[in-house]
Amino acid sequence: MLTAASFVIVVAGLKAAAGIVVPFLFALFLSIICSAPMFWLKKKGLATWFSILVVILGISLAGYVIGAILGSSINDFSQTLPAYSQRLNMQYSGMLSWLEGKGIDVSRLKLVNLIDAEKGMRLTAVLFNALRSMLGSGLLILLTVIFILLEASAFPMKIRAVFGDPDRSIAQMGRIADNVKHYLAIKTAMSLFTGVLVATFLAVMGVDFPLLWGLLSFLLNFIPNIGSIIAAVPAIIQALMQFGWGMAVGTLAGYLVIEVIMGNFVEPRFMGRGLGLSTLVVFLSLVFWGWVLGPIGMVLSVVLTVTVKIVLESFDETRWIAVLLGSKVPAPPPEIPQEAGGEAAPPASAAGEEEPPASG
């Protein structure tokens, strides 16, 4: 009961402080990703401050590009959405007329108010607006990343001063940090590659706002299994509003090909399956972190859950929780052979029988 009550208090505190926690978590994961190039630059002989400066300049450039894409694309998307919505409603009315011509009573099927494209597409804009507002606090995120990277070099010495067994603690925390860094680096690279493929495919197809939908695929690719499905829906609706049903089906086919290639061949080759989460845990983490931290929490949900899983499986007392969260089924323990009477056969040395005397 004490553990459950503590968990509720921590979750309530996170939800109340979401405006501060979300930028801090984003800065923390960003600093974990950027620590690898920073230490690489330091090994090449550059000073710590200059290595951090190069990394921060790279982060600032990426944030500026993403902010420019979001700003221009969201404004254009909001202006053209009513016209596309009217076109979709006309196509939808034509489909209902076609069904009525086939003798189907659409009023009994309650299909008249089934599709409201404007509301559905505005849900996508909520996520982009939340991301844009978070990028608006870029100065706070950059300062947090700078201070975390400055502390990264001195952190092992602090661990040695605090813990009684510093070597074991440093090795354990280093193992956790390496696993988290490996997951974030590979997942970020795979998500970026997926976003580039989606944007290129949609640009070739002639669908409007390909960079916006590619960015959405990049963000939601951090959510396995269902993230790609959620990212495909707005682009398919966009193709439907712009061209019609044929182009919508082609867009769906393109997303399926990209998802099959990336999800079944490319990503498992680099990522491995050791850090996988079960589908149920992915869905529950999406709901939980989205409720606690808002739309950005949905994007970070699987990253946060995988980080918790890595920490849990690093300790013997909590490894069983990590097994429950994972997607792999552990092998059952070996069965002990039993005798006909149903009791396990004791070893020969413990049977209590004397060996026969040696002959001669």
Image (spheres, grey):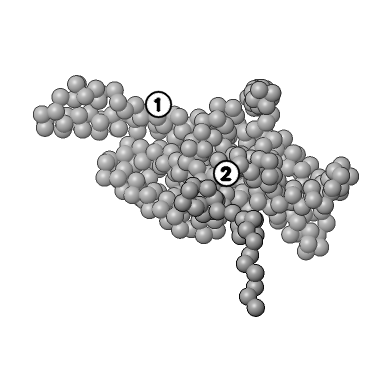
SS category of the residue bearing label 1: helix
Quadrant assignment for the N terminus: top right
For image coordinates 54% across by 35% down, the residue present is: 285
For image coordinates 74% across by 49% down, the residue present is: 172
Q: Quadrant of residue 294?
A: top right
- In primary-sequence order, the first of circles 1 and 2 is 1
Labels 1, 2: front one: 2
Residue that protrudes farthest toward the bottom in the picture: 360
Quadrant assignment for the C terminus: bottom right
Residue underneath mark 2: 323
Residue that protrudes farthest toward the front in the picture: 360
Position above or below: 315 against 135: below
Residue toward you, 132 or 28: 28
SS category of the residue bearing label 2: helix
Position above or below: 276 against 107: below
Q: Please, what is the three-letter code of the amino acid marked with disc 2?
A: Val
**Where does residue 5 sit, x and y in percent of width and height?**
66, 22
Q: Please, what is the three-letter code of the amino acid marked with disc 1?
A: Lys
Q: CA distance from mark 1 to mark 2?
A: 40 Å
Q: Which mark is residue 151?
A: none
Residue underneath mark 1: 119
**Where does residue 80 sit, x and y in percent of width and height?**
40, 33
Query: Left or right: 23 with respect to 285?
Result: right
